[in-house]
Every structure is written in C-alpha cells, then in structure tokens.
C-alpha cells in the first residue's frame, strides 16, 4: 500500500491513545480533527471527581454512556448549583462556565470539545473548597491548540 493511502486510512480510522494519568480514572483521545474538534472517552471511577474549573477557550460537551454523574456548575450569580445526570443525558460547558464532574457510580462519558488540550483554571479556593489533586491552572497564553 502506498504511503499516501496509509495516511488517508489512518485519518479515517484513528487509533485511540491515553491523554495521561488521571487520579479520577482514564482520559482516552479517540479522534482529533486538527484545529476543529477532539473526541474523548472519559472513565471516572465511583467517588472520584475532577477539579472545579473553567476554560478560557475550550468548549466541551458530553454524553453519559454509563453511570450516574453529579455536575456542579456556577449558576451565573457566583453560586454553585448541582444536577445529577443519568445514562443517556448530555451536558455542555461553554468557555468561562465553572464546572465539576463527580462520579456517583462508575461513569463512561463521550466528550467532544475544541482541541484546547491544557486549558483550565482551577477555582476551588474561590468557592471555599479544598484543592484536590490534579492538573494545575494554565495561563491563557500557554494553551495548546492542536
């Protein structure tokens, strides 16, 4: 098979790869359309949660394949609101929306987002929470756009 044909097939059927270790579970990149969209599988273990955060540029949405997921988000007035999602429900976190996901049972989520891979601002202190282990805040100028 010619090299160009192999590249085309690789783009049509990308191989999944881990985005890195996560204390809450796994983050697997399923597909990347450069400068357009990334598609990931998130596996969050029961009782674990991500950081309370917002994104400068990243726009993300997700579909809960399995489990029960607690979403915390800022209601626009500086107060956190909670909502529980069940299998088959979706969420959307536009840029600047403070949010956090917590697995009430083992969860699998398909996430589609803009490909800003390190865009996060941790805000636990602002809302009176202890900072949990995890990825640190990123300055806007240091965001990686793939």
Image (spheres, helix red, strand yellow):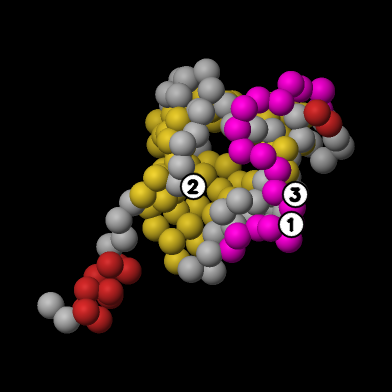
Mark earlier in primary sequence (2, 1): 2
Task: Indicate which label's residue lies in the foreground, 3 or 1.
Answer: 1
Q: Which residues are magenta?
A: 127-145
Left or right: 41 in relation to 101: left
Task: Indicate which label's residue lies in the foreground, 2 or 1.
Answer: 1
In the picture, residue 7 is in which quadrant?
Answer: bottom left
Residue 144, magenta (yes or no): yes
Taking 70 as reference, is 35 above or below it? below
Q: Main secondary structure of the magenta part?
A: loop
- What is the distance, in whole Å, between disc 2 and disc 1 at their CAs? 22 Å
Q: Position of residue 109 (x, y in %)?
A: 45, 39
Disc marking residue 140: 1
Q: Which residue is mark 2?
A: 111
Residue at the location (65% across, 25% down)? Answer: 132
Residue at the location (22% across, 73% down)? Answer: 6
Disc marking residue 96: 3
- What is the distance, in whole Å, between disc 3 and disc 2 at their CAs? 17 Å
Taking 41 as reference, is 70 above or below it? above
- What is the distance, in whole Å, between disc 3 and disc 1 at their CAs? 12 Å
Residue 30, magenta (yes or no): no
Mark earlier in primary sequence (3, 1): 3
Do labels 3 and 1 touch, CB within 8 Å?
Answer: no
Q: Position of residue 15 (x, y in %)?
A: 30, 56
Residue sitting at the far right: 77
Residue at the location (50% across, 52% down)? Answer: 112
Disc marking residue 70: none
The quarter in which the N terminus is drawn is: bottom left
In-front residue for pair 86/9: 9
Mark earlier in primary sequence (3, 2): 3
């Amino acid at each position: 098979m010619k090299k160009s044909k192999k590249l085309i097939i690789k783009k049509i059927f990308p191989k999944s790869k881990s985005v890195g270790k996560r204390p809450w579970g796994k983050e697997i990149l399923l597909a990347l359309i450069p400068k357009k969209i990334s598609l990931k599988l998130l596996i969050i273990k029961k009782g674990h949660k991500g950081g309370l955060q917002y994104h400068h540029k990243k726009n993300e949405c997700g579909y809960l394949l399995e489990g029960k997921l607690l979403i915390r988000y800022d209601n626009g007035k500086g107060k956190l609101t909670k909502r529980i999602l069940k299998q088959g429900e979706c969420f959307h976190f536009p840029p600047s929306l403070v949010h956090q996901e917590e697995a009430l049972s083992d969860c699998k989520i398909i996430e589609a987002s803009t490909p800003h891979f390190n865009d996060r601002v941790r805000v636990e202190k602002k809302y009176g929470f202890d900072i949990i282990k995890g990825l640190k805040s990123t300055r806007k100028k240091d965001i990686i756009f793939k």
